[in-house]
Image: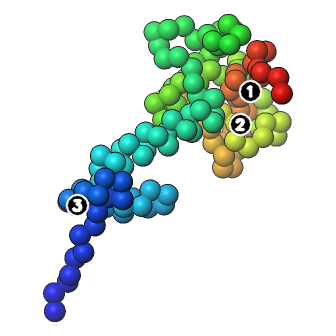
Amino acid sequence: MGVIYASHACRTCSAVSDDVADRGQPFGTLCDRCFKGEMRRTDEEQALEEGATALPPPLPPVCPRCGAERERRPTGTGHYILLEPEALPVALVPVGHRWYVTSDGCAVNWTGEALAALCRIAHRRVCDDLPSG
């Protein structure tokens, strides 16, 4: 008896083609084009949440709110983040706000077990020009 393959339709655009596949949670069944779009949107949301909203080179690494010059690093999502210059003990920085600079110079917001004894924080978290409230 032969195997029967069911064709799948992309949950976003309804396309039925060879590039439609189950992309796992939270994405579901998507074609390549829609999956790339979902990944881009997810990366944008993550960047905003983490404060990875620095202007890219060749613009100067300056905070648009307070004007402070900080260290700018690329992130894994294709965005840039301004980091405070001082490294802090990980015990002083809440999970989700611990940034590590990898050997290739990228900044990673790692929420797992500490990668090192010291970490950095995003400038946005301590900016002097934060809105009150």
Q: Quadrant of residue 115?
A: top right
Q: Amino acid at mark 1?
A: Arg
Query: Would you identify the image quadrant in which residue 122 lies?
Result: top right
Q: Earlier in the sequence, mark 2 or mark 1?
A: 2
Q: Secondary structure at mark 1?
A: helix
Task: Name which residue type carries label 3.
Answer: Val
* Disc number lying in front (2 or 1): 1
Quarter of the image with the N terminus in it: bottom left
Mark 1 or mark 3: name the one nearer the start of the chain. 3
Disc 2 + disc 1, Cβ < 8 Å: yes
* Residue that appears at 77% across and 21% down: 131
Give the residue number, with chain letter if any, for mark 3: 16
Q: Residues within 10 Å of mark 2 (few under 14, many from 20)?
A: some
Farthest-out residue, left? 2
Q: Residue at x 56, y 33 (%)?
A: 47
Looking at the picture, does residue 74 appear above or below residue 3? above
- Tell which tag, 1 or 3, sits nearer the viewer: 3
**Residue 97 bears which disc, if any?**
2
Residue 23 position within the rendered picture, expressed as x and y whole percent measured from the top left: 39, 59
Q: Residue at x 28, y 63 (%)?
A: 9
The percent coordinates of residue 94 (x first, y second) are: 78, 40
Q: Position of residue 113 (x, y in %)?
A: 69, 49
Residue 110 in sight here: yes
